[in-house]
Each structure stands twice: as structure tokens, then as C-alpha cells.
Image (cartoon, helix red, strand yellow):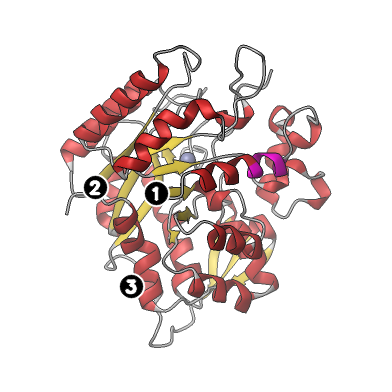
């Protein structure tokens, strides 16, 4: 029985070597040195401790944080995650924001829908700005008939119609990177290859009895189509990280959808290393639909804890977070070149125009999560 999944895959943080070229930006794009003073929003992090490391480095680097509560067995219990979110939000309500989530326990009971709506509404009243649904829907949770519960299951309708009517955004992480269904030698990134080599239990290529990548994407698409007014955010590039062409089709098909970039930057870099202009044009065309995010995760210090992202090697979390954020900035905002170990390549930055960076890094998240305090 597969019951534990890695969260979102480390996006090759350990593989970021020093920048090999800090080229001057042209006047329409930012420079590496603009990083700290431009306002930024990381729309996908997990703060699971009440200490202030995450908030401190976010303040230093000019980020607001959207911390996502998630029904993930390697994370602290949902009640504890909520408590941490309440504490950090009270400490810095302008910088720290959070999404609530719901438990699948009792999904088939007659009270599940009403109880879940009550829970969501209580968290929204407390300051949550949206709801997360995780890939346990589609890949882990089974009903009493032992069928996997998919996102387009009609038994979600009551809760999802409520989110739609109340304009409560849903951040949805379904499936895995497509690499998870491919043979090792066909995977596009080293971080996926080494992860799935080391974790055969999560490697879907080895579990043909589990749903295919395509069937999980199709269930998700049916769900989005059925809720055309739902504010929908596909986490991790809606698991379409492997092709900006396919992701473009998804965004064209579902005007209510946006995606976050969390933990998939190496996949973007893989594509831009092959065709930089194509990826750049994708960002220009969909500049209103893309939300910067990382999946940076700070968990309670515990040697058995598997969920820390980047994995803890003794380096303080804030040092790793700062390195991670600066690498992404160099890539998206500037023309600087850096070596990305996960794809074994020197990758040139996209040097997106300042106005696009301001949207992807800030104002898109502010528009999508309309309950954010001003
Ligand atoms: Zn995540």
C-alpha cells in the first residue's frame, strides 16, 4: 500500500553552483542586485514550526509568504499546522499568509460535506486565504469499494460548489511530475531520477496498477471544467511541468486557472536550455496566470523528518532559502548564467521584463488570493 509520498520534489537546490556569469541586465529587466528591494510573494511554502527563521529571511529578502497547510503524513498533524499558521500570521500579518486544507477522514459519511465546509469557513474567518487539495486525492485515498477517490468525484461537489460560490481559491496538487511514470533513462532531471531511484515505492513506473499520469490529468481537467467560476491554482505547474506547450493548452482551456511554479524550476530550465526563446514567449503570453512559488519547507528539527525542503544537511534553513530564492531570481529576472546540476547545464536567465516579473512575483498572487490583507 502506497501511503507516503514525497511532497513536491526538491528543485535541485543542492545542485545550484555559483553563478558563472553575472551579465549586466538590459534596462528593461532587473539585475541580480535588485533582488532584495523588489517586492515579492512566494505563493507556495510550508512553514511547520513556530520559530521565526522563515519570517526573518522573508523580511530580509523582501518576500511575503503563503504557507500551505496540507494533509501530508510526513507533516505535523493538521491541527498543529493550523496552530503554527495562526501564530505566524499573528506575528506578522502583512507578511505571513496561509491556506487551510481539509481531511479526507469520513469522506463517505453523511456529515463530511457539512463538517468540511464548516471547518473551511472557520479558517477563512480566521484569515486563511484559500484551500489546498493534495495528491492523496487521486493517488492514496480509497473509498469503501477500494476505488481511488479522484478529484472529479461527485462527492466533492458540495464542498467545491461552496468554494466556487464564495470565491475561495483552491490550490490543487494532483499527480506527480510526468517523470514519475517514465523509465529512469527518459527522465529529464537528475533530481527526479535520483529521487525515484531511491524511492521505488513512489515511482509510478514500477506500479502499473496505479492510475496513469494521463488519467490523473484527465480527472483534474474534468473537475476544473465542471467548476468554471472556481478560482483554481494548479500547484507545481499543474503537473504539466514537462511542456510549456501542454501547459499553454491547459491555461487556454480553463480561463479560471492559474499555476504556481513551485519545485519545478529545473523543468522550466530544462526546456529553456533547449529553446530559451520559446519558454520566454510562454512567460510573456501567460504573464497574468503564473505565480512564483518554491515549496520551501521548514519542519520541526527531527532526524527522522523526511519532509524538509531543501533536505537538511546542517545548513541553516534561512541560508538555504536565501540561496534558493536568489537562484530563481537570477534565472527569471536577469540574463545571468548559472550551472544547474539537476540538468547538468549552464542555463541563461530569461531576463523577463520588469513588468512581467512584478506580476509573476507579486501582483498575480495578490489578485488570485483576494482575501489577502492590504
Ligand atoms: Zn508543497
Q: Is residue 267 above or below residue 107?
A: below
Is residue 346 shown left or right of residue 184? Answer: left
- Tell me where residue 172 appears, x and y as whole percent: 49, 41
Secondary structure character of the magenta stretch overall: helix
Residue pictured at 43% horizontal, 53% vertical: 293
Q: Which residues are magenta?
A: 213-218
Q: Which element carries disc 3, helix, strand or loop?
A: helix
Is residue 179 shown left or right of residue 141? Answer: right
Q: Which element carries disc 2, helix, strand or loop?
A: loop
Q: Is residue 131 magenta?
A: no
Residue 292 location, quadrant: bottom left
Query: How many C-alpha atoms fall within 10 Å of the one at disc 3: few (<14), some, or many (≥20)?
Result: few
Residue sitting farthest toward the bottom: 27
Which is nearer the eye, 32 or 207? 207
Which is nearer the eye, 291 or 297? 291
Q: Which element carries disc 1, helix, strand or loop?
A: loop
Q: Which residue is mark 1?
A: 231
Is residue 313 shown left or right of residue 37? Answer: right
Which is nearer the eye, 90 or 223? 223
Residue pictured at 50% horizontal, 78% vertical: 335
Labelled pair 1, 2 in contact (Cβ < 8 Å): no
Q: Is residue 215 magenta?
A: yes
Q: Which residue is mark 3?
A: 34
Q: Which residue is mark 2?
A: 371
Which is nearer the eye, 26 or 262? 262
| The N terminus, quarter of image | top right
Q: Is residue 68 visible?
A: no
Question: Gap in Å between the C-alphas at discs 3 and 1?
Answer: 31 Å
Of discs 3 and 2, which sits in the foreground? 2
Amino acid at each position: 500500500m502506497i501511503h507516503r509520498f514525497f511532497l513536491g520534489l526538491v528543485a535541485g537546490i543542492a545542485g545550484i553552483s555559483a553563478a558563472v556569469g553575472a551579465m549586466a541586465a538590459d534596462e528593461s529587466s532587473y539585475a541580480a542586485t535588485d533582488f532584495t528591494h523588489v517586492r515579492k510573494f512566494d505563493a507556495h511554502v510550508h512553514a511547520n514550526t513556530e520559530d521565526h527563521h522563515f519570517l526573518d529571511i522573508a523580511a530580509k529578502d523582501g518576500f511575503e509568504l503563503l504557507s500551505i497547510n496540507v494533509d501530508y503524513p510526513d507533516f505535523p498533524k493538521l491541527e498543529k499546522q493550523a496552530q503554527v499558521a495562526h501564530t505566524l500570521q499573528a506575528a506578522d500579518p502583512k507578511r505571513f499568509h496561509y491556506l487551510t486544507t481539509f481531511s479526507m477522514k469520513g469522506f463517505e459519511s453523511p456529515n463530511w460535506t457539512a463538517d468540511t465546509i464548516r471547518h473551511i469557513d472557520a479558517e477563512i474567518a480566521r484569515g486563511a486565504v484559500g484551500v489546498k487539495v493534495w495528491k492523496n486525492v487521486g493517488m492514496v485515498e480509497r473509498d469503501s469499494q477500494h476505488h481511488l477517490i479522484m478529484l472529479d468525484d461527485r462527492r466533492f461537489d458540495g464542498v467545491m460548489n461552496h468554494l466556487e460560490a464564495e470565491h475561495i481559491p483552491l490550490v490543487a496538487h494532483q499527480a506527480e511530475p510526468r517523470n514519475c511514470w517514465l523509465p529512469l533513462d527518459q527522465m529529464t532531471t537528475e533530481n527526479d531520477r535520483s529521487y525515484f531511484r531511491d524511492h521505488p515505492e513512489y515511482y509510478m513506473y514500477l506500479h502499473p496498477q496505479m492510475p496513469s499520469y494521463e488519467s490523473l490529468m484527465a480527472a483534474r481537467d474534468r473537475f476544473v471544467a465542471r467548476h468554471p467560476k472556481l478560482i483554481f491554482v494548479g500547484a507545481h505547474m499543474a503537473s504539466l511541468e514537462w511542456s510549456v506547450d501542454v501547459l499553454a493548452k491547459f491555461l487556454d482551456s480553463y480561463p479560471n486557472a492559474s499555476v504556481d511554479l513551485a519545485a519545478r524550476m529545473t523543468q522550466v530550465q530544462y526546456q529553456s536550455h533547449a529553446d530559451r526563446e520559446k519558454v520566454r514567449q510562454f512567460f510573456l503570453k501567460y504573464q497574468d496566470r503564473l505565480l512564483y512559488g518554491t515549496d520551501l519547507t521548514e519542519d520541526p528539527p527531527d532526524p527522522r523528518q523526511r519532509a524538509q525542503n531543501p533536505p537538511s544537511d546542517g545548513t541553516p534553513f534561512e541560508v538555504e532559502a536565501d540561496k534558493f530564492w536568489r537562484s530563481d531570481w537570477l534565472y527569471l529576472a536577469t540574463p545571468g548564467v548559472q550551472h544547474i546540476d539537476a540538468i547538468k547545464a549552464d542555463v541563461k536567465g530569461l531576463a523577463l521584463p520588469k513588468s512581467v516579473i512584478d506580476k509573476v512575483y507579486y501582483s498575480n498572487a495578490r489578485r488570485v488570493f483576494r482575501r489577502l490583507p492590504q
